[in-house]
Every structure is written in C-alpha cells, then in structure tokens.
Amino acid sequence: RRTGHQVDINMIKYDFHHMRTKVHTEVDDAASDAVKLDRTLVHVKYATDALEHIRARIKQMVVLEETLPMRLEKQTTGIATNGNSNLKDSAFMFRLQSSQLALKREVSGQPSPMGTRELSKPKPDTKSTSSKSRSLAGQRGPSSQPTCSKQASGNWRHKRHVLTKMHQRNSILSSIAAVFGVLCSVSQNEIVIQNGSPTSAGVNLLKALNTLSTIALIALLCRSYWIDLMLDRLNGHVKKNLSLSTPITYKTVLSSRWLWVEIFFCSLHLPPFCTFEMEANAFENFLLYRAETVFTFLNTLRLYVLWRVFRDWILSDLPATHSISLISEVHLGSRFAFKRILNGPHAGAYIACFWASMTLLMGYWFRSAELQACFFSSAKHPGCQEHNARWWKLSGGETFEKNNDLYMQNSLWLIFITATSVGYGDIVPTTHFGRATAGTISVLGIVNASLLTASLANALMYSSGEVRVMILLEREKARLKLVDAAASVLGLWWRYRHRKRASFRGIVRLIHKDNHPSRKEAWHNFQKAKRRVKVGVEECVDIGQKISKVWKQTRSVERSVDMIGVDLWKGDMKSKTVK
C-alpha cells in the first residue's frame, strides 16, 4: 500500500503477461493476412511431407523389431561355429554384446552408450595441437589477428542511437531557427504596413536577425544531410558489410540536389539596409508591393522544417526502428509517419490542427496579397498618382475604390468559407495572388474534408474486442431463439404424432417432404439457432485473428514434426555409429 494509492497484484500480473505476450511476438506475426495464408499453405505442405517420412521411418522400425530375434539367432550361430577359443576371448564377447545392444537400441531409438570404437579412438594431443597453433599464429603475424581498438569501439559516428539523437536535436534547432526568422520577417512587414519607415533602425535590426537565422538554418540543414549520410552508411554496413572508415567530406554532402533545393528556399530573405518597391498589374489596375511583404511570403515557406520535428515525435515511441526497418525492408520515414497519424486514435485532432494552421497561414497570405503599397506613407512610386491605382475595375464589373483591409479576421473568414466550399461573396479577391491563395485553400479544404471523413469512418469501425463481444451477444440471442424454435418443432411433432403415429425421425422426414412454408421455416430456424449456439469462445473473433490463430497453430505443428524427425534421425545415426 502506497500513500494514497493501493497496489492491485492481479492487475500487475495481467499487465506483465500481456506485455510478455507482445514481446514474444515474432517478425512473421506482423505480416499481412495474405502473406500469412501463403506461408500457412507452405507450412502445411512441409508438415504433410514430414509426416509421410516419419510414417515410413516408423514402418521401418516395426520391421526391424519383427526381425530382431532372427538376426540375433544368426549372430549367435555364427559365433558358435568359430570354436571355443573365440568364446573365451573377452574382446570378442564385448563386441557381441555391443552388437546386440545396438540392435535393440535401433528399434527403440534410445541413445547408444560409448562403444568400442569410441573407446578406441585416439585422444588428440593437446600439447602438439597447441604448439602447432602457436607456430601458425607466429607465421601469420600480428596483422592477421582481429583487432578492435578502443578508438574504433568508442567512436560515436558508429553508434546509431547517438546519430539518431543528434538528428532529432538538429531538427529541433532547425525549426527554432526557421520560426525565429519568420517572426522577424513578419514583424518588419507589420511595421511597414502600419506606416513605419522601412529604413528605420528597428526594421534593419529585424532584417539582420533574419539573416543570422537564415545562415544558422542553412548550416543546420547541411549538418542534417551529413547525419543522414552517416545513418545510410551504417545501414549499408549492416546489409552489405560496407566499410565505415571512409570519411564523409563536404563535397559529398553538397552533392545532394535536394540539399540545394532546400538551401534555395530557406535563403530567400531580405538583407539589412535593403528595401525596394515592386510594380505589378492586377486586371489592368496598378498594384504596388513592398519588398518586405514579398519576402515575408517567401520566408514562410521555410516552415516546412516543422514537419521533421513532428515526424520524429510521432515515431519517438517506436523502439528499434532502424533494425526493424532493415529486417522488413520498409522505410520508416515521413510517409509511414503520415499513415500512422491517419490510422491512429487521434487522427481527427491532428487533422483539425492541420486545418487550423493552414487557415492561419493562408489567411496571412491573402491579407498580404490584397494590400496596396501605394496607400503606405513610405510609397514613392510615381504610378501611385495614376487613376487606376486607387479606382479599380475587375473584368466585367463596376469601378470601385481600392482600400486596404488590415483586419486579419476578415481574411480568416474568407479562407474558412472557401475551404468549406461555401463562399458567401461578401469578400472577393481582387489580385492574382489573392485568387491563387483562395484556389489553393479550396483544394486543401477538399483534401482535409476527405481525410476527416476517412478518420471518422475508421474510428466508427468495430475493434477486434468489440467484434468478439458482438459475436458472443449473437450467440446468446441464438440461445434464446433456440428455445422458441425447439418449441415450434415439438409442437409440429406432437400434431404429426397424433395424426400419423410416427417416430420423431420419421416425423422429421415428413417435415422435409412437406411443402408447407411455415413448417420448413420452423425446422430451419431450429437448425440455424443450434449451429450458432455451438460457437465457442475462441471462434468469436474477426477474420484477421482467425488467420493469426491458424498461422500460429500451423507453425507449432511444423515445429513438433521437426522435433520428432530430429529425434528419429538422431536415434538412427547413433545406432549406425555403434554398428
């Protein structure tokens, strides 16, 4: 008894046995149902052939047992003809007794004792052998002996768990650098939107911090690829016995194309003391963007590195992932983590979080895309003085005055109703980039809705335990129906008995011959209910568990047949050795 808690011994025993059963699960038990069926057929064929050989061996042993007295009689008569001198020979008598014991043990299959040949075998000269081994070792030299230096055994580059922890730590640092750079870029963009000066000291400080975070992110990306190469080399050493002594240079790391793609997307930022205006055309209307706004959008693209941290967190509770991946030849990466999320119990919560984050990101993109930089106090472009810079006209529409909507709630409302395929029309995108953002979130909304539907359907399906409970409940319902069906059959038997004076079996035959639907239905209901009542508790499982049970029982039969065959073979070989 602990303070405030009570220890349940039975529950501890149950947890122990449950976890021990999980630990003893073999690799083949994790295969699919189709693979288990194929392997079960192979094992059944093997067990059938082995049983045929065992049957032939047992038949041979029966023949030997029947002919044993005749063979012993022939040996004794042959010895009697050799004269009394041989009978007095103790060595010859010992050979006779050994042969008789060998014949008896050949029939019974018992292990034979040490015979005359084993006694007569010369013992190996340990001194000469040791001297020869020393001379051979001296001829080989010290270079031929296996060496394991302390430096090689303690090298952290050859330890997978150390590299895995380094990779996880590197992913976390990369995410921190990416998020910090995005926050700096968003801050400088908001300062400019709120009519701040893009050349102020605060904005330049934020740009410098963004530059430092970009450099750190690129360095961490290179280190992440280097760790991936080390892990790939360890896997190649395990699978193909490749050498681990070859160093990984910077040239090998920088030869990856995907690394350069990531460097390109992560290096897009606005350096300090650099600002400009970008002119664009939106349906024959003048549109102006600030460089801070454009590069803020490009900076948000580096948030993809957060997926690596989330992936490592999803797979962190799985032990020995590298070893299991090598054995099963299944890559436990992003695709596996994504499938595990969708097939897990919290799939709906993950999809809702992803939907909310995408709504927030797309809402900020849409807000930035619809801003007209001509209305900022720092605008100096001469095109802002034109008429189409303030008064816009969409294709086939009326002329309206362009205004900057700085409220984030309106952008989030547009993204939400677009993702749900509603679209009230109260807020309309007026730029090309705004329309592209709305189209992207509409596609993502369809994908999220389909994933949410699939996760809900998976959650509403019966589990294996619930399937077993449903089958047991159906059995109990059949037991209640069996009483009513039996009463109906007995009533029919009573009426037929008074009419035709027949036995119970004869009346059953009459019921089968009778074409009356109600009487046949009563008999069929009785037979159906009787079959359901006879269902055992072990049979109250789903198809997958039934296949697993058949698979385990087939393997146990195969192992038993192998043990019987090995025992018979050992007895045969020992009897032949004694002979």
Image (cartoon, rainbow, N blue to C red):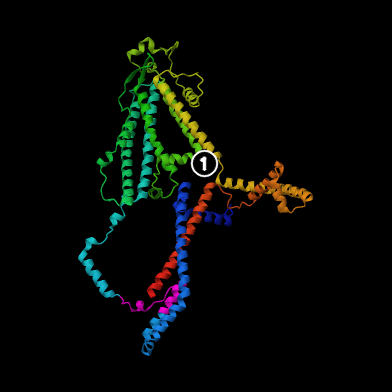
- Per the image, the residue denoted by label 1 is 345
Highlighted range, magenta: 99-123
**Is residue 158 at least partly visible in the picture?**
no
The percent coordinates of residue 525 (x first, y second) are: 67, 45
The percent coordinates of residue 362 (x first, y second) are: 43, 27
Residue appearing at x 40%, y 40% in the figure: 334
Q: Locate residue 148 relative to residue 432 in the image: left or right.
A: left
The secondary structure type at the circle numbered 1 is loop
Along the line of sight, the residue nearer the viewer: 155 or 19: 19
Q: Can you say which quadrant of the picture contains the C terminus?
A: bottom left
> Which corner quadrant of the image does residue 118 belong to?
bottom left
Q: Can you say which quadrant of the picture contains the N terminus?
A: bottom right
Q: Main secondary structure of the magenta part?
A: helix
**Is residue 468 at least partly visible in the picture?**
yes
Along the line of sight, the residue nearer the viewer: 54 or 310: 54
Q: Locate residue 108 relative to residue 151 in the image: left or right.
A: right
The percent coordinates of residue 59 (x first, y second) are: 47, 68
Residue appearing at x 39%, y 87% in the figure: 87
Along the line of sight, the residue nearer the viewer: 29 or 404: 29
Along the line of sight, the residue nearer the viewer: 511 or 452: 511
Residue appearing at x 70%, y 42% in the figure: 515
Quick check: 62 above or below 39?
Answer: below
Is 115 a magenta residue?
Answer: yes
Q: Locate residue 492 relative to residue 367 in the image: left or right.
A: right
Amino acid type, mark 1: Pro
Residue closest to the far right: 498
Quick check: 135 above or below 459?
Answer: below
Quick one: label 1, few (<14), some, or many (20+) residues within 10 Å? some
